[in-house]
Amino acid sequence: MNFLNKCINFAQNILPGGCRLCGMPGRDAICHYCETRLPVMTAACCARCALPLPAGEVCGHCLQHAPVIDSVTARFAYQEPLRSVLIGFKHQQRWPDARVLADLMLQVPPPQTQGLLLVPVPLHPLRVKARGYNQSAELCRRLGRQLSLTVDPYGLQRILPTPPQQQLDRTARLRNLKQAFVADRERVIGRDILLIDDVMTTGATLDAAATALKSAGATSVHGWVVARAL
Ligand SMILES: [Zn+2]
Ligand SMILES: [Zn+2]
């Protein structure tokens, strides 16, 4: 992206542009009409992986193969019209949307947040350099401020520049992810962590991050994302 485009994008991002979904002029980042169209998870969800459940608290898959992460909260399904906002937020320099997305998350926070340490799912430094920001860290900042929780962007590091996940099959993706994260023992030992990410797809990334945090001595690791792929 050239400098001029960056400037235009920046101006579009900071000026009040009306509804982020339909463009309707107004003060709200998401207008009342669009808010009713958001893909809210209506059914009860599995406490471990956030998939909608017909009954019970934990899904069959999590009962058979318990994930490392202790719980995941996702208020929305990864579907339109929210999906486009999340893609723009992550890939099209729309980092100021962290504010509206975090505010949507805050409408239904995890059951217990007191005392938790907020940690963003990290990108590899090369990815941060290319994109200019880590979208999860942007969410974390807003969430931490609104909930008066400490944010530690250095508790977890991504040490492998993993290739885009979509190009790999599941086995290769998991192998790749397993070595991707390392946590700072001094920062996370004995802490209860709330890992923040924009989108949960299979849960493999959150679980790999939770594994690194627990190996470094974290007492518990919970996840909180804007949206969950179904
Ligand atoms: Zn709208
Ligand atoms: Zn589950």
Image (cartoon, grey):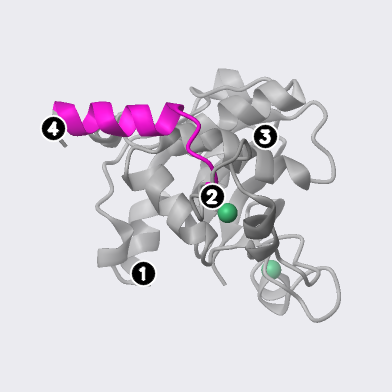
Residue in the picture at 36% in, 69% down? 171
Between discs 3 and 2, the one toward the N terminus = 2
104 lies above or below 183: below
Place of residue 79 in the rendered image (x, y in percent of width and height, measured from the top left): 53, 67
Q: Which residue is mark 1?
A: 171
Residue 196, visible in the rendered structure: yes
Q: Which SS class for mark 1? A: helix
Q: Which residue is mark 4?
A: 2
Name the residue nearer the viewer: 140 or 22.
Answer: 22
Q: Amino acid at mark 4?
A: Asn
Name the residue nearer the viewer: 218 or 51.
Answer: 51
Local crowd size for mark 1, using a 10 Å CA cut-off: few (<14), some (14–19), many (≥20):
few
Q: Is mark 2 within 8 Å of ligand 1?
A: yes
Q: Specify the quadrant of the image occupied by residue 39.
A: bottom right
Q: Which residue is mark 3?
A: 193
Residue in the picture at 84% in, 68% down? 57
Q: Amino acid at mark 1?
A: Thr
Bounds of the magenta span? 3-19
Is label 4 or label 3 in front? Answer: 4
36 lies above or below 59: above
Q: Amino acid at mark 3?
A: Ile
Q: Main secondary structure of the magenta part?
A: helix
Local crowd size for mark 2, using a 10 Å CA cut-off: few (<14), some (14–19), many (≥20):
some
Q: Quadrant of the C terminus?
A: bottom right
Q: Which residue is mark 2?
A: 24
Q: Is mark 4 within 8 Å of ligand 1?
A: no
Q: Specify the quadrant of the image occupied by residue 25.
A: top right
Residue in the picture at 50% in, 62% down? 201
Place of residue 115 in the rendered image (x, y in percent of width and height, measured from the top left): 79, 26
169 displayed left or right of 118: left
